[in-house]
Structures are given as structure tokens and as C-alpha cells.
Amino acid sequence: MTATAPAPSTARARATAFLPRLALVLAALLATLFTAAAPATAHAALTASDPTDGAVVATAPAQVTLSFSEQVAMGDDSIRVLDPQGRRVDTGELRDMCSGNTIRYGTALHSGLPNGTYTVAWQAVSADSHPISGAFTFSIGAPSATEVSLPTATAGGGPVGIAYGIARYAAYAGFTVLVGGAAFILLCWRRGAAERPLQKLVVRAWVTLTAATLAMLVLRTPYTGSGRFADAFDLEGLRAVLETKTGASLVSRLLLLGAAALFVAVLFGVYARRLEDAGTGEERNGEKETGGKETGGKETGEEGAGDTNDLTFGLAIGGAVVSGGIAATWALSEHASTGIQPGLAMPADILHMMAVATWLGGLSALLVALHKVPGIERAAIRRFSRVAFVSVVVLAVTGVYQAWRQTGTWSALTGTEYGRLLLLKVALVAVLLFVAHLSRKWTARLAEAPAAREEDAAKVGAQVVATDDVSRETSSVAVPADPERAAQLARQRAALDSAREKRVRDADPDRAGLRRSVLAEAAIAVVLLVVTTVLTSTEPGRTVEQEAARGSASTAVPDRAVKITLPFDTGGPNGKGSVRLELDPGRVGANTLHLWADTGNGQPFDLPEIKVAFTLPAKDIGPLPVVPDRAAPGHWTASGVQLPLAGEWRIDVTVRTSDIDQTTVQKTVKIG
């Protein structure tokens, strides 16, 4: 990528000594967050299993099934069943038992399994791209000693998880600075396209985003699988990743980054040269005097300006399309693509990311310009203030919608990790807006007496330049042959250049005040970006509450029957259906139990066998078995079902559809 701006001087490269220290502080902050952050949870969660965790079954089951709250991606090796000696006893073939809203997967077991304790270890990838895993045990006949230890590590953790998380943070940061820096140049300060510091900022952001995307693509296999770095070179695993939604999004992002590279090359190449040929807007308005040929120069400038305006418009449209496409690679593979209203959530997420990048990335570009380019015009600062205001409005509207979508209730704001992080983000935005208000005050002060201020700055600059010229002439009278002495003189000249630029830059106290306030904004923006990235990998509050409600009891109304419906799938031919259970009156004491079994098309399902068991885990009561009598095809009943205490009772319904195909489904209800 070729840039046309002149190479930075040694003095400019050494100027602003505090910026490296700031970078070290921010790096330390990010490192602390990386090491302290817990592995991210995801949308999907295990809601049931057959056999259940800790269950003791009389005979060996034909299969093990797992039910999830939302859609997951699983492979043939996602469910592993180990005997007490650690040998696999499953067939290794994944069974897809999903039906309607029921998300269930299973694996068949070998026949003739002996008694003992068996371990089930599973791993999957949620629909929002985050890996999940778990393990539990069940026993045949009676519990026994086992050589298998339940894994303590979670999917997506360990060194690979840390590396993948760093790449995610870097990708968000690179996108923000890339889009915001380019937008700052096109919308606020076109002359910045020819300034080397801004060129470096945008190009480095592109490199960061590209490298982070490649790292995420390569690490995806070990991140969602074994957790070993060596698996990053597994070509079969990479091929499998490319077939997933996340892999397709990462590849699409790389292709769009190729288009972004072309955009950056034109912005800092052709566009920068045309700006230099046409001159600045101030020059075209007559601030540049050319003797008696001013009129002709103005006409030429206007023609060049017209060409520049056309190119600016084209770059703005192309840049918006490319940056929107890159933002869509996140929206299509993470939280926005799952849950409620994905058709509205994904465009809102794209707008949200674009607004964040335009505001915070533009802020980083303004900070670099204020510190490295003393000649930035006040008009550019005022234009960025207006652009930032529009970005904040878009950010607020899309943020409110996202907050409602991901939390759903006021209690989720304070009762879930996602809600608390969201409140922290809102607080950071409020602080950032307050500091931005101070920056606007500095900008207004800059506009109060521009002529006098520029004249004073010009005088200081002229004095410094004159002094520096004398110093340079003095120091260059004789060039010593000693390399050490020559290097010492070079360092002295660099120090003089640094001091000169600093004095010119600090000649205007209002501009210095603006730099300080913008620096404070940038520091807060870094923390805000970190919190936002953590939010994208945290289970939304709405999902957490839904899972809590699904796992908790359904409240029984006094003197009204408890009615629940439990879908089942035994895995055999015609093994899918549902059981409707009614417990009347649904209170402590004697109750009447009714069961109806229906096929998938709603017809009565006359099962060979159906059994019910009631358990009160909090009091260690149960299971209390109930074998209902067949009253009619697909209908069973039992009277005098005694529930001795109030509490949250788990109801286990075991259905058998053939001699070997059976399953157990469960639900917890509150009996009061």
C-alpha cells in the first residue's frame, strides 16, 4: 500500500513522549481483563438428559440423549460415554432428535453393558458461536467406583481460549479505528489523507483487524474442540470450521478486508495527491495569494475541488458499504443472529457497530491529529463534533433496542452478569459524554478569536523556526568523522526538532486544553470498548432468566389442576410424541393423576408402558413411583397419588414405545 505523504521526521517520531507510556498502561489494563475474565457462557444450555445426572437405572439404556435450550452444532464425537475403566461404550454416531422447539441429540450405546457408573462428556457450539461443554454420570444397577474424572475445564477456556479472546478484542479495536479513522478523514478533515500519522493509524488498524481475523479462523478448531494449539494445523478441522456459520463469517470478513485494502490505497494514494494538487479549501477561498494570477488559480482550484468532491463521494459510499459488510460478519454469527427478532436485531447491530466505530475511532484519529499534526483546522474539530453527535444518537436508539432484546425485564439488569455489564457500559457512555461536553467547550473557545490566536501561534512558530535554523546551521558547520559524535549531534538535532514542534503545538492554550480532554475521552473509550467486547461473549440476561424459569418450578394455583405437556423421543421408529399430564388438585395430600399420550400428528398414542415418579430433592423424598392404569387408548389414570410435603417436586415420566426404545422426560412443578 503506497502513501504519498512525506516520511515523518525523526523529531516527529520521537515527539509526544507520554504516548508510549499511555499505550503501556492500556496494554496492562487489557492484559488484566484478559486474565481475570471467566470463560464466556453462551445462549444454549443443557436442560435435560436421559438418563439424568446421578440416576440409577435397572437395565442398561439403549442410548443417551441430551436436550438443549436452543439450537447447537454437534458432531459425531460430541457425546462420549465412558465405562468405569474409561473405555468408550457409545457407537460414536450422533442422532439428531430435534422436533419443533425440542432440541435434542443422542448417541446409541453398545448392548450388554455391565453394571457400574458411566460418565457422559459432551461438547457443542451454541448458535451464537460460543462453545459449551459439560459432563455427568449415571449408574446401571448400582453405583460403582470409576477411574474417570469429570473434566473441570470448560470449552473455550485455557490458553487457547485466552488467545482467541485476545484476537476478538483486537478485531473489535481494529475495526473501530479503521472505520472511524477513515470516516474522520472523509467527513471532517480531508487534508488528513496526506498526513503520515493518520495514514499510519488507519493502516495499522487494517493490519490488526486482518491479523486478528486470521488468528480467530486458525484457532477456531482448538477453541471449540480439544483446546490444544497443535490442532490449529488440522486441515480437516479447518475444513469443518469453514462449513459453519462462524467460519463463513470469518472468511467473508477477510474478503471484505481485501476490498478495504483497495479503499485505503486509494484514500492515501490518488485521493491524497488530488488534494495536494487542488489545494485546501482555505487556499481556494483566496487565503493563498499568487500575485496577479489569483483568479486563474482559483478557477483551477475549483476544477480540482470538483474532482476531489466526486472522489470523496465515491470513497464515502464505497467505504460505507465495505465497513457495513464487515460489521455484518459479527451480526450474522453472534448474539444478534439468535434469540427474538433476528431480522430486526442484525441491522440494528450493524448500525450500532458503525456508530461506535465512527465515534470512538474518529476520536482516536482526532487525538492523533491533535498530538502529531499541529496544523489541524478548527473547522475539522467542529465537524467531528457534529458527526459524533449523530453517532451518539444512532448509538442510543440501537442500544436501547439491544438492551430490551437482550435483557427483557428490569430484574435482568441487576440480577444477571449481562445486565450489570450493560449498566457499566451505560455509565461509561455517560462519563464519556460529559468529557465530550468539555471538549465542545474547548472547541467553542477556539472559535472565539481565531485571527488573533492564529497570529500568536504563527509568531511563536516563526520564532521557534528561526531559532532552530540558527541551531541547525551551528550544528552543521562541521560534521565530525567520529560516528559516536555524529550520533550525538543527530540526537541533539532530534531533541531540537521535538522541542520546536512541542512549542508550536502548545502555543495555543485552548488547543492544548482540547488535546487533554480528547485524551481523556480516548482513555474512557478504550475501557468502553473492552466492556462492549465482553458483552458480546456473555449470555444475555433474557436467556439467563428464561433458563432459570425453565429449570424452576411452575407455580400451581390452589384448587386448580397442574397441567404440563412433555415432548418425548425414544429414538426408535414412531418414537416421537408428547405426554399431557394433569395432577388434580395439585396440592399436598391425595391427588388424581391423568396422562394422555399423543403422536406427532395429534392422534392418541397407545404406549406399551408409561410410568411416573415424584421426587422432592430439597427434602430427599422420592422417587415415589406411580404406575397408572390404562383407561382408554392413549389415556392412563391413577388415584390417591400422595404428595406429603409442599415444595418443588420433580415429575419424571418414563415412556416406552417398543421393547427396547424408551426415554424419560421430566418437569419441576411447585406444590403448595
Image: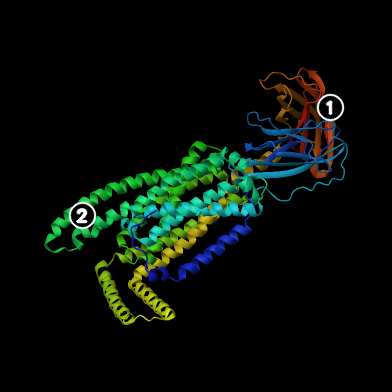
**Closer to us: mark 2 or mark 1?**
2
Q: Which kind of residue does numbered mark 2 sit on?
A: Gly
Rendering coords of residue 48 (x, y %)? 72, 37
Circle 1 crowding by C-alpha within 10 Å: few under 14, some 14–19, many from 20:
few
In this rendering, position of residue 241 left or right of residue 199: right
* Among the two numbered marks 2 and 1 on one chain, the one whose residue lies closer to the N terminus: 2
* Residue 219 or residue 166, whichever sits in front: 219
| Count of marks, rendered view | 2
Residue furthest front as drawn:
481
Relative side of 561 to 348, left or right: right
x%, y% of residue 506?
35, 72
CA–CA distance in space, label 2 to label 1 = 94 Å
**Image quadrant of residue 60?**
top right
Return the mark for residue 301. 2
In this rendered view, identify the residue nearer to me: 344 or 88: 88
User: From the image, which quarter does the C terminus lie in?
Assistant: top right
Q: Which colouring convention does the figure follow? A: rainbow
Residue 226: x %, y % from top left: 68, 47
Q: Position of residue 185 (x, y in %)?
A: 35, 55
Element on which disc 1 rests:
loop
Viewer-closest of 616 and 147: 147
Residue 466 in view here? yes
Amino acid carrying label 1: it is: Val
Describe residue 265's horizontal placement relative to residue 407 as left or right: left
Q: Residue furthest left?
A: 292
Mark 2 is surrounded, within 10 Å at the Cα level, by few (under 14), some (14 to 19) or many (20 or more) other residues, namely many
Q: Which residue is labeled 1 in the image? A: 627
Q: Is residue 463 above or below residue 263?
A: below
